[in-house]
Structures are given as structure tokens and as C-alpha cells.
């Protein structure tokens, strides 16, 4: 009889454990899919928008949804090939300007409201990735 009680308790513990894990994970899974749909829509709007102005040397290529609450912006350095660009210098000069734009530009409001991560990838004119700048909600909220 003790074995039956022990087996029953083990089964109840397993059920309770699985239920607790499912209860914790389910909102995260739903949030992942819900947010991803919003990011997909926002990326599509950016791609259609004529208000996206490229900076002098940066040509906007496309925006795309990343995993979860992440949007990826792709730019090409139209006048430079990979060997002509210092990735560290590009990041050092560009990141503060991006943060200012993200904090102040209304185009980023939906993304700020979603607490989305933003990744800016810069490619050379010979289509080699030079650098990527990752901006998190902690970066643009401070």
C-alpha cells in the first residue's frame, strides 16, 4: 500500500509540476507570437513608407521582423566596400544618432510602446555585413 501511495503522490507532483511550468511558459509563448505579428506589420509599413530618409552614405534596404519583439533594419553603405569601413568607428558614430532618433522620432513610437529590440545592420556596397547595432528598451528608455 505504501508503494501505491508513493506512486500516487509522485504522479500528483508530476501533474502539478507540469501544470505550473505550462502556466508560466504559456504567456511567454503567446506574447512571442502576438508581438511578432505586430513587428511584421510595423516592418511592412516601414518598407512601404516613403518617409524613410537615408542618411548621406546610408541607403535603407529593408526592415524585417526578428524573433519575438525584435525588428531588424538593413542599410547599405552605398559608397563604400567592406575594406574601406572601420566597423568600430561606424558603430561609435552611428549609435548615439540612432538612440536620439528612436527616442524622439514618431516613426519609432509603436516600437517603443512594445518595448521592442531594434537591430540595425550595415552592409557594404559589395553586400558584406560590416556591423550591427543592437538597441534594447533599456537603451532607449534611459
Image: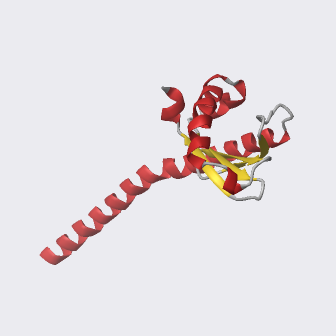
User: Is 71 on the left or on the right of 57, as rendered?
Assistant: left
- Residue at 80% x, 33% y is 53
- Considering the image in quadrants, where does the N terminus appear? bottom left
Q: Residue at x 71, y 52 (%)?
A: 123
Does residue 127 appear in the picture of this structure?
yes
Q: Is residue 75 above or below residue 11?
A: above
Q: Nearer the viewer, residue 86 or 34?
A: 86
Query: Which of the 4 image quadrants contains residue 129?
Result: bottom right
Q: Nearer the viewer, residue 114 or 94?
A: 94
Q: x, y (%) of residue 88?
A: 56, 46
**What colour scheme has been applied to the protein in the rendered image?**
secondary structure
The reply to whether residue 118 is visible in this rendering is no
Q: Nearer the viewer, residue 26 or 123?
A: 123
Residue 38 as seen in the image, left or right of residue 25: right
Q: How many marks?
A: 0
Residue 2 placement (x, y as % from top left)? 12, 74
Q: Is residue 99 left or right of residue 139?
A: right
Residue lying furthest left in this view?
A: 2
At which x and y percent is residue 75?
73, 46
Q: Residue furthest front?
A: 84
Query: Whole-percent x and y of residue 37?
Result: 68, 47
Front residue of this view, candidates 49 and 56: 56
Q: Within the image, what quadrant is residue 6 found in?
A: bottom left
Amino acid at each position: 500500500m505504501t508503494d501505491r501511495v508513493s506512486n500516487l503522490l509522485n504522479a500528483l507532483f508530476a501533474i502539478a509540476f507540469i501544470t505550473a511550468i505550462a502556466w508560466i511558459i504559456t504567456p511567454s509563448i503567446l506574447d512571442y507570437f502576438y508581438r511578432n505579428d505586430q513587428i511584421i506589420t510595423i516592418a511592412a509599413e516601414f518598407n512601404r513608407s516613403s518617409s524613410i530618409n537615408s542618411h548621406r552614405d546610408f541607403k535603407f534596404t529593408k526592415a524585417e521582423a526578428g524573433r519575438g519583439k525584435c525588428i531588424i533594419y538593413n542599410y547599405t553603405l552605398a559608397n563604400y566596400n567592406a575594406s574601406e569601413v572601420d566597423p568600430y568607428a561606424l558603430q561609435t558614430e552611428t549609435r548615439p544618432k540612432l538612440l536620439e532618433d528612436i527616442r524622439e522620432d514618431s516613426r519609432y513610437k509603436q516600437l517603443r510602446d512594445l518595448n521592442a529590440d531594434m537591430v540595425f545592420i550595415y552592409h557594404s556596397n559589395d553586400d558584406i555585413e560590416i556591423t550591427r547595432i543592437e538597441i534594447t528598451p533599456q537603451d532607449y528608455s534611459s
